[in-house]
Image (cartoon, grey):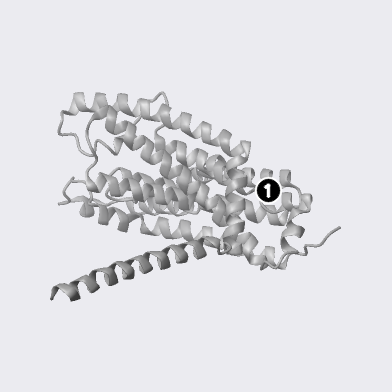
Amino acid sequence: MTRPSLKRWIPAQLMFWRQVKEDQAKHQETKAQEPLHPFWVLVQKEVTDHMRSWRYLILLAILVLTCMGSLYTALMSIRDAVSQEGPEVGFVFLKLFTASDGSLPPFITFVGFLGPLLGITLGFDAVNSELNKRTLIRILSQPVPRDYVINAKFVGALMMIALLFFALGFLVMGLGLMMIGIPPTPEEFLRILAFLVLSVVYVAFWLNLSILFSIRFRQAATSALASIAVWLFFSVFYQLIVNMIGLARANTGLAQEASASVEQIQLVQALLRLSPNHLFSEATMTLLVPSIRSLGPLTMEQVYGALPTPLPLGQSLLLVWPQVTALVAVSMLCFAFSYVSFMRQDIRAR
């Protein structure tokens, strides 16, 4: 390229790139000025309401305190385990979520107990409180499809639940890493991520159930009591009822033979697996304790020749796949009932 042509080429290139930068700036400015989609406006409103509510802040404080307490007991248990079993003890990082010295339950027990309360708290007055305050009528008087409202309530609350659980999970991992000084292996990290995702799915079921009650009942107190009653039934009474059925069957003398005993255990397990709490407990223990190789009774023929080694992550996921599928299914079922009830509800100014 000759010198005169080079003198013309350089200004032309500078002009071209300046024009490109100006076009990009205009495009970004135009995009920033575009109004947000109505659905995401409603989601933003729900997230803001939850973040400013005292009940969410109180539950957040309780969960953080219990998280710190369970982390402390886990660290004491890990120290004892390492001193007894030596440095070759496996999956040390997962013990942050499962180990306990007996003074406080481990982290997964707190999640299983307090997680449903979080979902109920975020959803028990999602619809009926807005009906009583007449704010729902104002929203629906705008050109907004009705299903945007119920979808936004679910998505906004689910985002808050996911944010809370992932923040707590990474907080435990960060503090545990500083305390024990051992980083998690890739498999341990993936197992913890799977546990956090499963926790969000489990709490989403209770959220959908409480939203359903908030649509069915006009008063927020009634929907809250109904949600807590279901939670207490599955947390406390359901296991007692199933155990009584198992004992009654054993006392009849039908379970004297080995095959009959196996059938009885399978019957009790099948009844227990109708509870979402039991499904969540089985799935989380299998994910965070790789030494669990089966979730049912095993015969001597099945145990003979099996190596007592931890299961790889893929096999653990296959083992808990029915439990995960059941939790997702009941959560979607509750949301479908909520959606249909809300779309058919008579909402008018009184």
Residue 320 occupies quadrant: bottom left
| Quarter of the figure with the N terminus | bottom left
Quadrant location of the C terminus in the rendered image: bottom right
Name the residue type under label 1: Asp
Provide residue 342's location: percent of width, then percent of height.
68, 63
Identify the image quadrant of residue 169. Answer: top left
Identity of the residue drawn at 54% across and 44% down: 116
- Residue 170: x and y in percent read 36, 40
Using the image as rendered, state which of residue 71 and residue 149 is in the foreground: 149
Q: Is residue 145 left or right of residue 70?
A: right
Q: Which residue is mark 1?
A: 125
**Furthest residue in direction front, as rendered:** 4
- The residue that appears at 62% across and 43% down in the rendered structure is 228
Q: Locate residue 87, reporting x and y percent.
A: 15, 30
In the rendered view, tell whether residue 303 sits above or below residue 338.
above
Q: Residue at point 64% right, 44% down?
A: 229
> Tag 1, which secondary structure?
loop
x and y percent of residue 34 in the render? Answer: 55, 64
Residue at position x 62%, y 52% from top? Answer: 45
Residue closest to the far right: 350
Count residues near mark 1 (Cα–Cα under 10 Å), then give few for <14, some for 14-19, many for 20+.
Answer: many
Question: In front: 72, or 176?
Answer: 176
